[in-house]
Image (tube, helix red, strand yellow):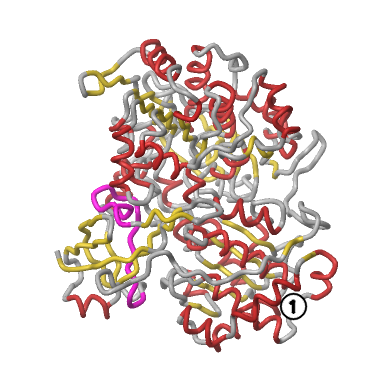
Amino acid sequence: VRCPVGALIPKTTQRPAREVKSICSYCGCGCGIKLGVRGDVIVGVQGDVDNPASKGRLCVKGRFGIAEFVHHPDRLTAPMIRKNGKLEKASWDEALDLVASRLRGYTPDEVGVIASAKCTNEENYVIQKFARAVLGTNNVDHCARLCHAPTVAGLAQSFGSGAMTNSINEIGGAACILAIGTNTTEAHPVIGLEVKRAVDNGAKLIVANPRKIDLCRFASLWLRHSPGTDVALIMGMMRVIVDEDLLDSAFIKERCEDFGAFKESLERFDLAFVERVTKVPRDKIVEAARMFASNSPATILYSMGITQHSHGTDNVLAIANLAMLTGNIGKPSSGVNPLRGQNNVQGACDMGALPNVYPGYQAVSDPAVREKFETAWGCSLSPAPGVTLVEMIEAAYRKDVKALYLVGENPALSDPDVQHVRQALARLEFLVVQDIFLSETAEFAHVVLPAASFAEKDGTFTNTERRVQRVRKAIKPIGDSRPDWWIVCQVAQRLGAKGFDFNDPSDIMEEIRSLTPSYGGISYQRLENGGLQWPCPTDDHPGTPILHTNAFVRGKGRFIPLKYTPPAEMPDEDYPLILTTGRSLYHFHTGTMTRKVIGLNVIEPKGVVEISPEDASQLGIAQGDKAKISSRRGEVIAKAKVTEASPSGVVFMTFHFAESAANILTNPKLDPVSKIPELKVAAVRVEKA
């Protein structure tokens, strides 16, 4: 995070001729930035003190990790077509004509479209409209399937809306914070600062995480539960709250339903069982329950450690139950607050880049909704929900999906069991990849289309707190790259489609708000004065910082009974350890952007496997040794980092590094509800390489 006195600056600095306000393109915090520009070159990045989410603060990626990737010599600058097995440069007309010609030959069920959390709202809207109105398919998805699909599925059941209930700046006012399954200071650094501010203000911080993370230093209580046992832990806490009559009975009676069946389900979670499953001592479970229930307002923060499980939706439902049980919904500094992983993963979901909903989470299976979009788009639309991202890849492997149009995603490194993913990509008859770099996925493409980066186009991003904010063009597109919305519209027009003749992203936003009630009052004119949090249904609506204040979106909050389901893959004699994965402060996702930044690579040049001193000693592995990590799906080599951050029996890797790709090892087993794969628990064997 930025130096408080501004003493840290780049080694070489040029004075900008002008500054352009925009939004950081990394995590979901939605930090405001000022791009310093000289000519058509970004020469510096500063935090925007007027931004309500970040207040001028930036992490190391936002401060030092933007200009280098935007201007990196490896940027794609011209379309490419595979000829005789090699990608060769081509003109835009040649590439676009080929894409349209090839896509024309497939039925709706034979094609899939993958949108992007890196793209703007306007671009994601155009992409899903292209899939549905032009290609005739609901086979459209994006990387939310790998992060917060259980949030959308779970919170929609409990509350009626699958989004963060409160605002970032409220966290500092909480009396108690439960941070579960989130390494906040690494993955969402600016939100991590808000957590620390709350502690400074006297808040109780409960950290529930298998790893010893930075926030443990500030915690009143650390619950070191075994990976994949979150439901048991949370249900155990709620058993204590009910047994000791610490629940908010008035809130439950007035605002909620189905409490009786939920209360009965707690009988399965006596503390002896919970302690045995989670490995958390019962006295700590009792202390956590009392602390959370007795300090109001209390807020819950969570991220991938909750969602990336074969029972991820159950994890989210448990969290929703806990918030309702204690009355911590609908008031300041409380709520259920999923921390979104990418800059616009919230917006991509809002825009309908999902197989079962149109923009605004309007169901494709609802005849009235479908008729509304058919009238607006001038076409017939399929009533059948499409398949998810992971299912598309599997369908490609079976050759049921024959063509894939992929924008700004990198499943060849980001998805579980990536060796299988790469085999599936190789089986496609036609793969179009639209990106700013030649990613690991683009190497399989038949056509590569060069996209403009966020700094080279206008649009909007929606951050984790539902705040829609303006992204502004600071420089012209690098080389012959083009904005994603323009590229998709060109393909659509070549396929004879109408309704893709937008002149500017602001025109796209006008169409979005005409069809999406929660965005109805959001316009570029209003956003010039700052962001707006949806729902914002009318032009005079101020936006909604807190959801569910007087009533839940679904009417009454719904308690849902739960059972404990263990991870799909548990340690055994052949694979005796658990692998869990996560992020580093210095890199982002598959490293497509951050590994182009020299300074970040100097700090963290390679991936490592974190292993406990006990396990390392037993395996004869010393600090810095090369280790081979194997699962039922493959093996990788990484340098060993012996650290007490990892508990005995658990090893940890980030997924940023292609050379030691953790997702070669991870388990593709899906949550039956949200269809997210179990990226957080895989059985592995570790040995000295």
Q: Give residue 177's quadrant in the image.
A: bottom right
Query: What number of labels is visible?
Result: 1
Residue 471: give x, y in percent of width and height: 56, 34
Residue 64: give x, y in percent of width and height: 40, 45
Q: What residue is at 65 percent from the left and 75 percent from the top? A: 265
Position of 323 with respect to 438 (left or right) is right
Q: Is residue 57 visible?
A: no
Q: What residue is at 59 percent from the left and 72 percent from the top? A: 199
Camera-side residue: 47 or 328? 328
Q: Is residue 672 visible?
A: yes
Mark 1 neighbour density, 10 Å: few (under 14) some (14–19) many (20 or more): many
Segment tinted magenta in the rendering: 647-665
Position of 388 with respect to 212 (left or right) is right
Magenta span includes 655:
yes
Find numbered disc 1 in the image and state the secondary structure of the residue it sits on. loop
Magenta span includes 271:
no
